């Protein structure tokens, strides 16, 4: 069930294009590219903070597994956004950064799900020691 949001992200990834262009209104394409890049950097930082917090809660075996999964996810995100932005001209950077932001927002939600375990969710790995 945890993978359903990721599948939905893949299906609607194209909406990141419009989102980036709507949010980053600038007078030039360069302005929009820079804005979209800054938005991605903020989102990526937020995701990395949650990743680090979750890593601290995991036992060493699960840390290895999450690290491997995260590396695979970063590769997936890169390839999906390269696909989405391929064949474009000067707008490519805006589309690419919007895609990265959109997919990363989904990853943040996934990581937060592990940080905020619901009662009885046995698949949740982020329980702090006082929650076990």
Image (cartoon, rainbow, N blue to C red):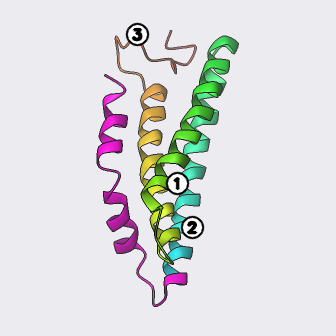
> Foreground residue, 119 or 67?
67
Q: Which mark is residue 122?
A: 3
Q: Is disc 3 surrounded by few (<14), some (14 to 19) or many (20+) residues within 10 Å?
A: few
Label 2 residue SS: helix
Q: Are marks 3 and 2 in contact (CB under 8 Å)?
A: no
The image position of residue 59, as x and y in percent, is 65, 13
Q: Residue at x 48, y 78 (%)?
A: 32
Residue 26 is covered by the magenta coloring: yes
Work out whether 18 lies above or below 132. below
Gap between marks 1 and 3 measured at Cα:
28 Å
**Residue wearing tag 1:** 43
Q: Which residues are magenta?
A: 1-30
Q: Residue at x 42, y 53 (%)?
A: 102
Q: Which mark is residue 29?
A: none
Query: Most prominent secondary structure in the magenta stretch?
Result: helix
Q: Residue at x 46, y 40 (%)?
A: 107
The image position of residue 27, as x and y in percent, is 45, 90
Gap between marks 3 and 2 measured at Cα:
37 Å
Label 3 residue SS: loop
Gap between marks 2 and 1 measured at Cα:
9 Å
The image position of residue 5, as x and y in percent, is 33, 35
Q: Is disc 2 surrounded by few (<14), some (14 to 19) or many (20+) residues within 10 Å?
A: some
Q: Are marks 1 and 3 in contact (CB under 8 Å)?
A: no
> Foreground residue, 66 or 116?
66
The residue at the far front in this view is 87
Q: Which mark is residue 38?
A: 2
Along the polypeptide, which appears first: circle 2 or circle 1?
A: 2
Along the polypeptide, which appears first: circle 3 or circle 2?
A: 2
């Amino acid at each position: 069930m945890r993978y359903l949001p990721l599948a939905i992200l893949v299906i609607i990834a194209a909406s990141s294009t419009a989102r980036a262009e709507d949010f980053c209104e600038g007078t030039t394409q360069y302005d929009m590219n820079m804005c979209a890049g800054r938005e991605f950097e903020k989102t990526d930082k937020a995701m990395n903070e949650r990743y680090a917090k979750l890593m601290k809660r995991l036992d060493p075996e699960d840390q290895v597994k999450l690290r491997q999964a995260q590396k695979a996810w970063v590769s997936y995100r890169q390839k999906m956004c390269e696909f989405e932005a391929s064949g474009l001209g000067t707008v490519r950077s805006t589309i690419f950064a919007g895609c990265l932001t959109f997919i990363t927002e989904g990853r943040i939600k996934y990581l937060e799900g592990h940080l905020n375990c619901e009662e009885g969710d046995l698949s949740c790995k982020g329980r702090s020691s006082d929650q076990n």
